[in-house]
Amino acid sequence: MTDSTRTSSTVVANHHPRNRIRSPNRDSGPTHSEMVPLSDNSLPSARRTHPGNAGTDAALGRPVRTYCRNCEALCGMTALVNGPSVLELRPDPRHAISHGYLCRKGIAMAGIQHDDARVLHPLHRTDTGDFEQVSWEQAVADIARRLDAIVEESGPDALAWYLGNPAAFSPTHLFSALVYMRLHGSRQLYSSISQDGAARFAASALLYDDPTFIGIPDIERLDLIVIIGANPFTSNGSQLVMPNIQARLRAVVNRGGRVIVIDPRRTDTADAFEHIQIRPGTDVWLLSAVLRLILESDEFDIDYADIYARGIEILKSTVAGVTLEETARRTAVSEAEIVDLADAIAKATRMAVYGRTGTCTSAEGTLVTFLMDALNILTGNMLDSGGVLAGWTPWPMRLAANLLGIDGYDRYRSRIGRIPEVLGFMPAIELWTEIATRGVRALFVSAGNPVLTVPGTAQVKDGLSALELFVSIDLYVNESNRNADYILPATTWLERADSQFTLLPLMARPFVQSTQRVVLPRGQAREEREIIRRLLWAARPRSITRRAISRLLAVLLSIDIGATIHRLNRALTMLSRGNAAAEHGHAGISLRRAPRGLVRHIRRHGRVDLAPGPIVARLSKVFAEHTEPDRAYPMLMIGRRERTSLNSWLHLPTKRRGAPTLQLAPQDAQALAVDDGDRVRVSSRDGQLIATVEISDRLLSGVACLPHGWASFEGHGCNVNNITPDRLESVDKLSGMARLNAVDVRISATDAFEI
């Protein structure tokens, strides 16, 4: 496949010779007793990003307040609207949480809104492989008829659904899809969680008996934060709602605290603070060594820790054999650095260890996440504010999650790999085997592009091609849905009403905000909620009861969300006893109720288990393995976030736009006799690709770095999933997480014309 570049005012889109391609797949402060809006000057040296001229007289636009739904930051923005057009998106200085901060990727949504490559009408793939425009009535009727026949013949698990990352930022999208699957009785639910955060939820389930329990660093009051495998300067924070996190981290240092970043690469975040460079995939060893030093120190009070945690002695004996010498050899972190890190963590008054995508996507993502939380717990930093807060989940949300089946862990396992479900989701890497063995015959993919996001590109493509019914709900024709039977046009988030109450558990400062749609949907684009409503109404199951329930749910999904969403927010607030502290126009409500420490959780659920059987068994196995570097594949591949990219679906224009580069350390480039701009072959046990070299002094020697989420580009095989492990034995056994980091690779120079 050969792709070229087409640039709109703010976005770069790829297009195929036959179909235009885009890839939407969608990483001491005030007291918490009464949350009130910060003043605009509360954040020292806050960097505010302002948009450039969009090429239109912004003075002609009508300002509409809304907020960004690209990531967890949820920054406030003002849209300048003229009729059906969004002329420009600007930061909202009056927003109660973001205070005028907005990154480039949020601003770029104006370009996506009016991109002429968007799918604006239902498309049906013909026998020739081309797409033809059809009516909604035609598309929905044919999909419902074919799906009813498949489910009737093969049972409910013949139907699967893959949800992309943007579904997490659209409560109605997520809710509707889950309702649809529950109605059909299918457990074949998949999502980008397998490439993102399943390890986090699995670790929480094993530690707290609650997969939705996620600790939030109390950044505005802590003295030390240790960041592992995360780059919040680029990602804006992940599994953490904290706009302008860059300024908040700098404020830690300004008040005399420390920020320590542990990463194989000197990221933008690491560049701003203290940096410990570590060999990829060895976080388990480093954290275990630090944990051992703390548990064996004279200052550690095991009697006090035993009040809120059990299994301490078992955990202590499990890590007892982790020596400084062996840890330093494996991690490339010196013994002195390990001791200093343990000392800093143990002595900090208010401390948090925080990690994200880099830690979750290693071979032992669940173990690493568990160990980070164990350090927070055993140092007393999860007991109250000032360290790690326990996020607040209103009881109506807990009830809804329970009814939809997305609040559990290991209630059942995948059919082939026997991997635990996480929040009701199966490991995405197993979906393609389900299709190949005719377990799954029909698939919906909404806001996702698994060809670019799930390991094993060839396997994913084969699976999608083998489906009897493949329906995509998306903004664009992309690498995955070009083989779909139907592509149904979805709205952008500027075209729908929304509320982000579902992200309350990730907020250090609880804030419920809502927005009406900014503009009407273009063409015949419809919200995912409306699309699923049509499918429910058209379904004709043989069971009269199921047909009646389907019709009832279709009626419920037809409710005008925009007219009721603000009232629902207030009702949710009152039902959960989270009284409003302040109103902010139509934009949102700050809540007095704030996250608390682990004490509240312990009172309800008992002591935290620091030695669950699966964790202890897996740790023991890791420590018993005497692995040495693979001489056939001597280097380790990692990914990276980019300020100008968002997963697989948004790549902004830059002065040097082209295929994503393969970063190499200077000494590795010298050993390979390659220079900037040279092309090299990157091989693994699972495949190969061709990439363009960028020499970078930010990398540890022996480490190569290529971003995730790109397709082929002008002959360059830039899809990193061509080389990531796609075998079931490669996934994290406790969570089903794909291994996207610390992949063993071999790099060799290529002929200048080799593709």
Image: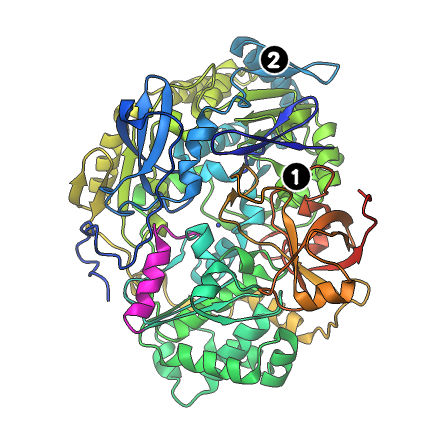
Q: Total label count?
A: 2
510 vs 564: above or below: below
Earlier sequence position, callout 1 versus callout 2: 2
What residue span does the magenta drawing correspond to? 238-256
* Residue under pointer 1: 711
Mark 2 burial class by Cα count in 10 Å: few <14, some 14-19, many 20+: few
720 vs 343: above or below: above
State yes or no: residue 116 in magenta: no
Q: Which numbered marker is on residue 142?
A: 2
Can residue 726 be spotted in the picture? no
Question: Image quadrant for the N terminus?
Answer: top right
Mark 2 residue type = Asp
Using the numbered discs, state the Cα–Cα distance from disc 1 to disc 2 in whole angstroms.
31 Å
Residue in the picture at 58% in, 56% down: 361
Q: Which numbered marker is on residue 366?
A: none
Q: Is residue 741 left or right of residue 592?
A: right
Mark 1 residue type = Ala
602 vs 176: above or below: below
- Of residues 475 and 503, which is closer to you in this image? 475
Question: Image quadrant for the C terminus?
Answer: top right
Quadrant housing residue 30: bottom left
Mark 1 vs 2: CB contact within 8 A: no
Label 2: state its secondary structure.
Answer: helix
